[in-house]
Image (cartoon, grey):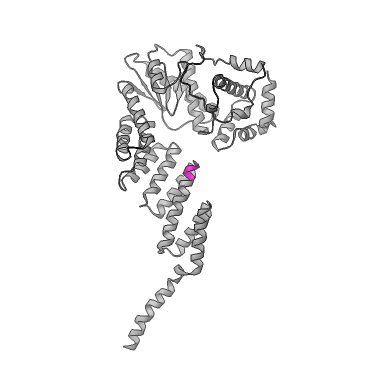
Amino acid sequence: MRTSFFLIMLVPLLVAGWTHPAWSSSHIDQNNHAAELLHQGHYQEGLELLKKLHAAVPYDEQIRRNLSNGYLQAGNSYLQQKRYPELAELMLEAQEFDDTQRDFWKLRGYALFGQKAYFEAEVELQEARAMGEPDAQILYLLGEIFYTTDRMYEALDVLESAQQYDAENHAVNAMLEKVRRELAVEKEMDKEYGGHFVVTFDGEQNEELGAEVLEVLEDAYNWIGSQLDHYPEERVTVILYSQRQFSQLTNSPDWAGGLYDGKIRLPVGGIDSISDQVRGLLYHEYMHVVLRDIAGNNLPTKKKKKKKKKKEPESGELDISLYRQARENQQLFALSSLEGSFQKLSGMQVFLAYQQSYAVVRFLLDDYGWQPLRDLLFALGEGQSISQAFDAALGVYGLSYDSFEERWRESG
């Protein structure tokens, strides 16, 4: 009886001894140190330490919670910094740790959407959507995916649901209004599908228009792709409006020849054939697609103007008379001043900045070919500044950003 009582008392003590590392001062110190690393933004070091602790004591709930929170802290930081590939990889690892955590699926959906992997992003977000109560952010991002991939009625459905659950969400309300406005115009239009494009147009105006535009765009896809050695994977939506529809839907000025905002929008509805001007316009707008696909948002942007300021020429050639005049009067911008958004410019400065940028790129292509331009774009896509990207792209020619600018100015 005494022996039995002894064993009853001893076994819990032995078990406690075997699991004692979970409560050791060493693990407590390491856990606290990991929390401090995460707080300081050293996510990789903090997560690595927590993963080692979790492997050593897998049943410790405090360490498990800290590791889960660490994944979320790091994930949200990567999202804010738009480090989408790293975020996608991290959230995949987090899902392997705990596939019931809804935010892991949600963040991975954000990451894949940021990389334009729309189908994969949709899978992640639909999984997150099914895990709990309706989430307006998840529904909104699904709406963005459906809108971008030209599934307008599906976008309308999820955005209306998002508004129902978060009626004060400005982004949801603005996106829903945009979808409703565009659907009102596009619902009666025809669609023509190609390998890399889908064209929406007024079929009553010209039944052959969609096929003809697709043919030109496929030529542009192949030619520009061969020059830059880059071929976007996602199908591009192209919408052909009348001038009135285009102005109303895009709030663009009368002189605007087109717009790329994730979809190519052109005011050419009702044309009878593809003229050289329209062909040049299609190539020009598709080039915007490629530039954005390579460099992301790390490019200067033109400022939208609500009022007509200057009439562009009727031909496919860009009018650079303002640039020539500024060059003659030594009133050109320093290239460094064109590195950011053109939103900061006003009046005729916008046109000069646009024409000067065109002239610089034209000089780069004429004197050095397409390879430096490709290297420049990919460097921008990696997050480098324009000056750093120029140094990387033209270093093989012994040129820095400053010496390139000097040579361009001397070129006449």
Q: Is the magenta stretch mostly helix, strand or loop?
A: helix
**Of residues 200 and 305, the one drawn nearer to the viewer in this rendering:** 305
Q: Is residue 118 magenta?
A: no
**Of residues 171 and 284, the one drawn nearer to the viewer in this rendering:** 171
Q: Is residue 5 left or right of residue 308?
A: left
x then y, percent, for residue 101: 37, 51
Whether residue 242 is visible to the viewer of this picture, yes or no, is no
x then y, percent, for residue 223: 51, 24
On screen, residue 302 above or below 320:
below
Task: Give the residue furthest to the bottom.
Answer: 2
User: Could you say which quadrant of the image residue 192 lies in?
Assistant: top left
Name the quarter where the N terminus is drawn: bottom left
Whether residue 94 is visible to the viewer of this picture, yes or no, is yes
Q: Is residue 263 left or right of residue 205?
A: right
x then y, percent, for residue 76: 46, 46
Name the quarter where the C terminus is drawn: top right
On screen, residue 106 above or below 376:
below
Q: In this view, does 83 lie to the left or right of 165?
A: right
Range of magenta residues:
78-82
**Of residues 203 and 252, the one drawn nearer to the viewer in this rendering:** 252
